Image (cartoon, helix red, strand yellow):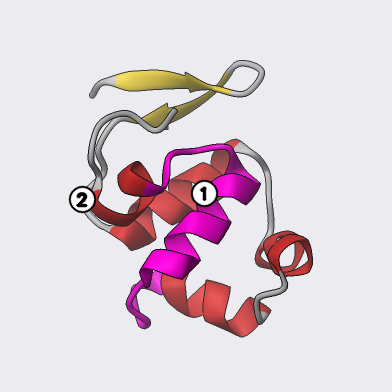
Amino acid sequence: MDRRAHGEGEQVSANPSTPATRLDEAMAATETTSADIANAIGMDPRRIRRLRTGETRMLCGDAAALARALGVRAAWLSVGDGSAR
């Protein structure tokens, strides 16, 4: 699997299969919880948990806000386009 550097030695893969898996992976790489992200971007933590499980579809605004908070590209997060950073 192609791996890209993320942060200080953390790794995220270049193209996991779904927005949910990319979000989960980016959050794990940054050791960020749903509550951390919710506080940072003003999103309900339940929505973030639903995005992580794939229960809720990721909208463009969600991807942009989450990507900024996680330090990844919104295009990568939402559709897997290109690299994470």
Magenta extent: 53-74
Measuring from the top left, give residue 20's x and y in whole percent. 36, 62
Marking on residue 29:
none
Residue appearing at x 48%, y 56% in the figure: 64
CA distance for labels 2 and 1? 17 Å
The residue mark sitting in front, 2 or 1, is 1
Q: Answer above or below: position of 81 versus 54.
A: above
* Label 2 sits on residue: 17
Label 1: how many Cα within 10 Å (few below 14, some 14–19, many 20+):
many
Q: Is residue 60 magenta?
A: yes
Q: Secondary structure at mark 2?
A: loop
Query: Where, by quadrant of the figure, is residue 3 drawn?
Result: top left
Residue appearing at x 69%, y 59% in the figure: 33
The amino acid beneath tag 1 is Ala
Tally the marks: 2
Measuring from the top left, give residue 78's x and y in whole percent. 32, 56
**In the drawing, does residue 83 fall left or right of residue 8?**
left
The amino acid beneath tag 2 is Ser
Q: Is residue 58 magenta?
A: yes
Q: Answer above or below: position of 42 versus 65.
A: below
Measuring from the top left, give residue 58's x and y in whole percent. 37, 71
Quarter holding the N terminus is top left
Label 2: how many Cα within 10 Å (few below 14, some 14–19, many 20+):
few
* Label 1 sits on residue: 67
Residue appearing at x 26%, y 43% in the figure: 16
Query: Where, by quadrant of the figure, is residue 4 drawn?
Result: top left
Q: Quick one: 31 or 70, which is closer to the camera? A: 70
Residue appearing at x 68%, y 50% in the figure: 32
Q: Quick one: 68 or 4, which is closer to the camera? A: 68
